[in-house]
Image (cartoon, rainbow, N blue to C red):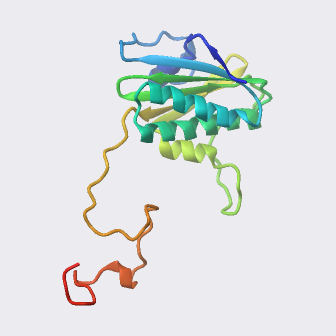
Amino acid sequence: MASVIPSAPLGTDAVGLLGHGAATAVGPQRGPAERRFRFELAAHPGSPAQARRLTRARLTGWSVCEDTCDTAALVVSELVTNAIVHTASRHIVCELHDGDDLLRIAVRDQGCAPSEPHPAAQRADEEHGRGLLLVDALCHAWGAHEHGPGLLVWAELPRKADTPREDTGPRNDLGWGARPKPGSPDEGSDGDDEDGGPA
């Protein structure tokens, strides 16, 4: 079960600006638009799903766009999963920090990990081990530093998602981003249909 705890910063302000060891530094002044939300989860297999739900609910309440909510839910899920799988933690603390142009996520564990987190090369057929590769691909920036006996892993996302691209051409990808193979009939000819009319 999750518990919502008062917002004493985990160091996300200082981490984003100063890097390693910055948790003891004083962060910048928060403006009226900046908000924080912290919650604590038991290190349990169901906790990543609970972290996703809590993250999505809070960010939706803060009027964060849907794309950023989706990305943040995935990132927090991956970071919580790593804290559960790779440490001997009993509890995981998560913090969301909503600023004017950045959303910061921090996940703190209780320690006993062999080293700092890093993306690892994986075989194509492996089902695990891609969490930090996803975080690295999705986030504007991310990192980790020691925090007491544990580790604090943070990630930053742009506050607003990119505006959708204007794509006026026909699509044959069902929304998955696949494109027709070169030379396939769907690739497009000279703009004419089989019946000789315009496309």
**Can you give x and y, in whole percent of width and height, for residue 126 in the image?**
71, 58
Residue 20 position in % (x across, y down): 55, 23
| Viewer-proximal residue among 173 and 110 | 173
Which one is in front, 2 or 87?
2
Quarter of the rendering occupied by the C terminus: bottom left
Name the residue: 69% across, 37% down: 82
Q: Residue furthest bottom?
A: 195
Q: Is residue 190 visible?
A: yes
Q: Position of residue 40 (x, y in %)?
A: 67, 21
Q: What count of labels does the image hold?
A: 0
Horizontal and vertical percent position of residue 105: 53, 28
Q: Is residue 154 visible?
A: no
Seen at 68% across and 49% down, the residue is 129
Q: Is residue 82 above or below residue 154?
A: below
Q: Quadrant of residue 175?
A: bottom left
Pick the residue in front: 117 or 195.
195
In this rendering, position of residue 90 left or right of residue 161 = right
Q: Residue at x 80, y 29 (%)?
A: 88
Between 59 and 121, the one lying in front of the other is 59
**Quarter assignment of residue 79:** top right
What residue appears at the point 27 percent right and 67 percent down from the top-left corner? 169
State left or right for residue 126 relative to residue 32. Answer: right
Q: Is residue 18 above or below residue 50?
A: above
Q: Quadrant of the N terminus?
A: top right
